[in-house]
């Protein structure tokens, strides 16, 4: 038997009618009988196209307020019969079941209804039963039936009808079956995750319908793909395609700058997911100048991000630097024009969008899922560990430093002064090494550490770090506490006029 099949009938049952008219007209032009229900039936009739109501096939009306329309043996028999099976064909004749060759379905918008904040009753009513069943049946029987399961596939399907005059190959039908099972599995995942917010069944399900192949992964010999709706978070104004590493750095930049949302003008420069420069000033121009001063060497090829609009003066300075990506909530027209002067430089306007609440990463033969670290250390949450209290300026700098520390790879130490990142020790196996690295780096860029503050992502099990810091001129320390030897570090600070505060919150970042 040839795998080419001429369609003679189609069942159409859709929620959204967008894009349906051209397909209905094409089916009609090809002489294909159309079966339909409810609102879809009326829509097609209003186009002046003849349509057979499903009720005429089943001898049953739509019942239970529309909950049951297509759930009937005469509908599913028409879809699921095997046309090379004599028994199936004879049963179609015996029970007067019409053969259905095409099934077109658009499901109730469950995810959109949840996102709209609708009531639970309205959400439950948007769990599609008949539509999802039609999709499964038609996709299962792809040997004989082609299933169009999404508005996004209408254009491709219309082109197929036009090109082949209503014929489809087995490869065509199998391709659309794969698309259909993608839609149905995604739909079921969304429903499960809605219910599982309360039940907390220990199962991990995630489904993303959009994916974009990247030039390569972390290295040129690795394949890479981004799954997600990038356009929901950014408007890309200019530049080359983002790479795998660009995306990781952009993610780090966005999460770091979220700590400074609504604050005074703040500018950050990141490299390999860590801040190498960050400053907060009265103007974004000065914030950029001082962020760059934190490490002008590492800034080469970095990711730049601002929490306010980038103006012409700032753009003029940025344009002197080779950088991969510049992110801001907006760019002045002059700034945009200047920064477009490098053809590969990527300019991103960040939108007001809610970021994911969970972090996911592969681990061994499974995945690790955790809530994001949503705690931002605040002055009112601090415990003053030493009798000598920090000044208001030191307190402000310690909170500033702790925000950076939270988003820097462990083990880390962050040194800051006057709302400027002086240096950090990132990803070290020893906290002492992290501190020594940060001091050495700060000194190499001629920063005076006298009166600077130190932030640590975890506690000090020994007083060695505070002793090294004190000898370097650091006057205040912020750390989570929690070591059985906290007192050793606290006592050293008290005896050497160093203020120490405890946050009670560890911020490891592995």
Image: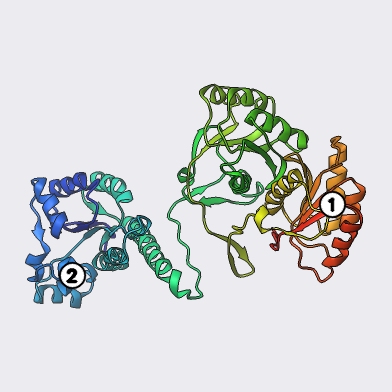
Marker disc for residue 153: none
The residue that appears at 25% across and 62% down in the rendered structure is: 145
Q: Is residue 303 left or right of residue 476?
A: left
Residue 506: name its quadrant.
Answer: bottom right
The span from disc 2 to disc 1 (Cα, nearest Å) is 68 Å
The residue that appears at 23% across and 44% down in the rendered structure is: 162
**Across the whole image, how many numbered discs are drawn on residues?**
2
Q: Nearer the viewer, mark 2 or mark 1?
A: 1
Q: Given contact means CB atoms under 8 Å apart, are the residues at marks 2 and 1 in contact?
A: no
- For the C terminus, the quadrant is bottom right
Residue 303: name its quadrant.
Answer: top right
Most foreground residue, 380 or 217: 380
Question: Label 1 neighbourhood size at 10 Å, few (<14), some (14-19), many (20+)?
Answer: many
| Residue 483 horizontal/vertical position (percent) | 80, 68
| Residue 464 horizontal/vertical position (percent) | 90, 59
Q: Is residue 373 left or right of residue 25?
A: right
Marker disc for residue 68: 2
Q: Is residue 121 left or right of residue 37?
A: right
Mark found first going from the N terminus, 2 or 1: 2
Question: Label 2 neighbourhood size at 10 Å, few (<14), some (14-19), many (20+)?
Answer: some
Most foreground residue, 378 or 250: 378
Most foreground residue, 197 or 77: 197
Which secondary structure, mark 1? helix
Would residue 31 be visible to someone looking at this image? no
Marker disc for residue 435: 1
Would residue 470 be visible to someone looking at this image? yes
- For the N terminus, the quadrant is bottom left
The residue that appears at 21% across and 51% down in the rendered structure is: 166
Which secondary structure, mark 2? loop
């Amino acid at each position: 038997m040839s795998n080419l099949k001429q369609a003679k009938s189609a069942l159409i049952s859709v929620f959204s009618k967008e894009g349906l008219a051209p397909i209905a007209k094409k089916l009609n032009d090809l002489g294909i009988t159309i079966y339909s229900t409810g609102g879809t039936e009326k829509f097609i009739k209003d186009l002046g196209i003849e349509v057979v109501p499903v009720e005429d096939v089943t001898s049953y009306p739509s019942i239970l307020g529309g909950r049951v329309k297509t759930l009937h043996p005469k509908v599913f028999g028409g879809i699921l019969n095997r046309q090379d099976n004599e028994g199936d064909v004879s049963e179609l004749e015996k029970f007067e079941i019409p053969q259905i060759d095409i099934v077109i379905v658009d499901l109730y918008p469950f995810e959109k209804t949840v996102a709209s904040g609708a009531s639970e009753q309205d959400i439950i009513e948007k769990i599609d039963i008949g539509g999802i069943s039609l999709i499964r049946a038609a996709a299962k029987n792809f040997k004989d039936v082609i299933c169009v399961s999404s508005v996004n596939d209408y254009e491709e399907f219309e082109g197929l009808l036009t090109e082949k005059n209503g014929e489809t190959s087995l490869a065509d039908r199998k391709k659309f079956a794969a698309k259909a099972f993608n839609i149905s599995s995604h739909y079921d995942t969304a429903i499960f995750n809605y219910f599982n917010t309360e039940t907390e069944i220990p199962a991990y399900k995630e489904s993303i319908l959009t994916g974009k192949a990247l030039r390569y992964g972390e290295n040129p010999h690795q394949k890479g793909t981004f799954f997600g709706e990038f356009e929901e978070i950014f408007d890309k104004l200019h530049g080359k395609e983002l790479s795998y590493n660009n995306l990781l750095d952009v993610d780090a930049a966005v999460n770091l700058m979220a700590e400074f949302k609504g604050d005074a003008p703040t500018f950050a420069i990141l490299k390999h997911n860590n801040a190498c420069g960050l400053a907060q000033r009265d103007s974004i121009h000065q914030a950029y100048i001082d962020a760059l001063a934190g490490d002008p060497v590492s800034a080469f090829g970095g990711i730049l991000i601002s929490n306010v609009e980038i103006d012409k003066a700032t753009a003029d300075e940025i344009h002197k630097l080779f950088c991969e990506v510049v992110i801001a909530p907006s760019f002045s027209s002059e700034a945009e024009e200047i920064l477009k002067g490098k053809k590969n430089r990527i300019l991103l306007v960040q939108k007001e969008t809610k970021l994911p609440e969970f972090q996911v990463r592969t681990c061994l033969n499974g995945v690790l899922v955790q809530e994001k670290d949503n705690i931002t250390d605040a002055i009112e949450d601090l415990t003053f560990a030493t009798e000598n209290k920090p000044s208001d300026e030191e307190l402000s700098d310690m909170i500033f430093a702790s925000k950076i520390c939270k988003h820097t790879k462990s083990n880390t130490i962050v040194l800051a002064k006057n709302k400027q990142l002086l240096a950090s020790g990132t990803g070290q196996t020893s906290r002492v090494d992290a501190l020594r690295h940060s001091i050495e780096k700060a000194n190499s860029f001629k920063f005076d550490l006298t009166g600077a503050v130190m932030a640590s992502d975890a506690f000090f099990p020994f007083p060695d770090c505070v002793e090294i810091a004190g000898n370097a001129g650091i006057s205040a320390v912020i750390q989570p506490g929690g070591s059985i030897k906290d007192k050793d570090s606290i006592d050293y600070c008290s005896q050497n006029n160093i203020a120490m505060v405890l946050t009670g919150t560890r911020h490891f970042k592995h």
